[in-house]
Image (tube, rainbow, N blue to C red):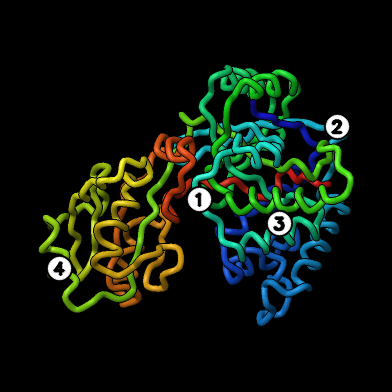
Amino acid sequence: MVKIRPFQAWRPTTEKAKNIISLPYDVVNTEEARSLAEGNPFSFLHVIRPEIGLPEDTNIYADEVYEQGKQNLQELLDSDAYLQEEKPSLYLYQLTWKGHSQTGVFCCVSTFDYENNIILKHELTRPDKEDDRTRHILTQRAHAEPVMMTFEDRSGITSLMEREMASAPIYDLVTEDQVKHTIWKVEDTVSFESAFSKQDALFIADGHHRCASAWRVAQKLREADSSGDEEYNFFPAVLFPMDQMDILSYNRIVYKLDENFFERLSGQFDLKKTSDPVPEKAGTICLYLNGEWYSTALPESESNEVNAQLDVARLQEFILEPLLGISDQRTDKNLNFVGGIRGTNELESLVNSGKAELAISMYPTSIQELVDVSNAGLLMPPKSTWFEPKLRSGFLIHTF
């Protein structure tokens, strides 16, 4: 039984929204955030990447960074750029990009559901990133960014959404990356709460660190007397039906190769030169080195575990570890990741410029694979999925 909850959101005025909303904190680094927010004091990047308003040599984990974020958020909420809803509400959030639309329910979900594995995970989190977001949430007393989740609609939620979308949206705008963001306010919250109570599970798509941090905040604040109904026990998420979700590939680059890597690779795999750097089907990869693209099939793992059959896991089992000595994709400094949104031209550029010696183009993990791994209580290798388009931060803020 999934519990969703309306919340008394802070949201930007229609006139200010486009200047405020921003990419999520984990999509841009400090330098990119500083450039994007330059000349725009309303940018929500000042809240989620507050170091951009401090001297460039400031440690991003310094006390003043968290206090600056708290101050920047409060100034926004106190300004005429934001308003707070008079009563708790639910919303629908639609993303439209390159002819594809997906619509989800923007609500609060329960940290107890996270704790009890009703909200299912598929990734390990990094302690440093968890610590950072936990401190931001505690200092600001706000969940400033939603998590992206998915579910298999078994209780008519899609039909409920279609009914609500007949009304006028409260936001309808296109951002600079040509993504259309449309948000409706839901009047009949009870029907949605009832429908989700018939769902068995939610699956985290994008935002494992934000989930873990929200849960840690709730645990800490529960140390005082707690009824379990306090706002800090809930955090914002956008819940998309599985059949509307798209996943892009998450590609790899290797910085340094052994001198005989190509000979060992070609001795074990049937490499075929190709003019198409995108794998044609699951179980195949494309590799770029020495100015050429090659395609090859990955052997199947002998393991019966569902996560062992993922392409990213088979890449690890048969190439990264035995041929390159990369035993942990999460920590090995010789490996890095490139989101599929950047395309294969980015992979070629990194190799041709000498910044890397090998690029690996992956076939996307499917949403069904994500769900199957989560249902089995297993974990995917790091950077197995890249969801696009991204939710924008700053639309609807949950305070406690």
Percent position of residue 301, x then y: 26, 47
* Looking at the image, residue 75 lies above or below residue 39: above
Residue linked to disc 3: 44
The residue type indicated by label 2 comes to Lys
**Residue 87 numbered tag:** 2
Between the C-alphas of marks 4 and 1, the distance is 31 Å
322 or 360, nearer to the observer: 322
Residue linked to disc 1: 123
SS category of the residue bearing label 4: helix
SS category of the residue bearing label 1: loop
Q: Earlier in the sequence, mark 1 or mark 2?
A: 2
Residue furthest bottom as drawn: 57
Q: Earlier in the sequence, mark 3 or mark 1?
A: 3
Q: Is residue 79 left or right of residue 194?
A: right
Residue linked to disc 4: 264
* Looking at the image, residue 350 lies above or below residue 171: below
Q: Earlier in the sequence, mark 4 or mark 1?
A: 1
Mark 3–mark 4 CB contact (< 8 Å) = no
Camera-near label (3 vs 4) is: 4
Percent position of residue 135, x then y: 74, 61
Quadrant where the N terminus sits is: top right
